[in-house]
Image: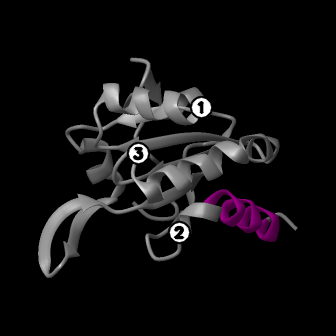
Amino acid sequence: MTIGDRIPDVLGIDQDGREIKASDFRGKKLVLYSYPKANTSGCTAEACSLQAHKTELEEAGYSIVGISKDSQATQKKFADKHALDFPLIADTDTELMQQLGCWGEKSMYGKKFMGILRTTYLVNEEGIIEKVFTPKEIKTKIHAEQILQYVADNNS
C-alpha cells in the first residue's frame, strides 16, 4: 500500500485478545508500524521510542498500533516487559502485512527469504495512508522523534 490507499478495516487480534479495526480509530490519526520480531534490540528500541513519546503523539492526534508475526502470547510478554500500552497485532499468518506491503523478500548473509520489512504508515482520520516510512528511513532508537518531526514539518 502507498500514500492515498485506505488501510484494511480488520487489522487483527492484539496481545490482549481484542479485535482491532481501523474503524476503531476513525476521527483519529494512526501510527501503524510493522516490526520483525518482539524482544530483539531494534524492535525493542523502536517500541520503547514510541511508548516514551506516546503522549506527544497523542497530542498530535495519533494512536499507535504495532504489527508483527509474533504470537499473541509473545506480543503480550513483549508489551508487559516494556510497559507498552498500545495494541500489538499478532499477524501470525502475515495476511495484514501482505495487504500493507510490509511482507517481502529480504536477504541476510547472501540468503534470500520472506520476512517483515520494518515500515511505518501514518494514517489520517479517514483511514487513508498519508506517509510511509520505509525500512531504510527508520532509525529505531529515535523513530517517534522522526514521526513527530515529520508531523511538525507538514503542519506548519
**CA distance separating discs 1 and 3:** 13 Å
What residue span does the magenta drawing correspond to? 143-154
Amino acid marked by disc 1: Ala
**CA distance separating discs 3 and 2:** 18 Å
73 vs 25, nearest the viewer: 73
Rendered position, 81 above or below 16? below
Rendered position, 33 above or below 141? above
Answer with mark 3 or mark 2, whichever residue precedes in sequence: 3
Q: Which mark is residue 39?
A: 3
**Residue drawn 34% across and 63% down?**
117
Rendered position, 144 above or below 111? above
**CA distance separating discs 2 and 1:** 22 Å
Answer with mark 1 or mark 3, whichever residue precedes in sequence: 3
Examine the structure image and report whether residue 93 is included in the region drawn in magenta.
Answer: no
Q: Position of residue 46 (x, y in %)?
A: 54, 55
Amino acid marked by disc 2: Ile
Left or right of 123, for residue 12:
left
Q: Position of residue 152 (x, y in %)?
A: 81, 64
In this view, the residue farthest toward the right is: 156
Q: Which mark is residue 138?
A: 2
Left or right of 45, for residue 117:
left
Quarter the N terminus occupies: bottom left
**Residue drawn 21% across and 74% down?**
108
Q: Quadrant of residue 18?
A: top left
Q: Which residue is mark 1?
A: 83
Q: Position of residue 130 (x, y in %)?
A: 59, 60
**Residue drawn 63% across and 52% down?**
49
In this view, the residue farthest toward the top is: 17
Binning the other alpha carbons within 10 Å of mark 3 as few (below 14), some (14 to 19) or many (20 upward) gives some
Q: Position of residue 97 (x, y in %)?
A: 31, 50
**Residue drawn 51% across and 27% down?**
80
Amino acid marked by disc 3: Asn
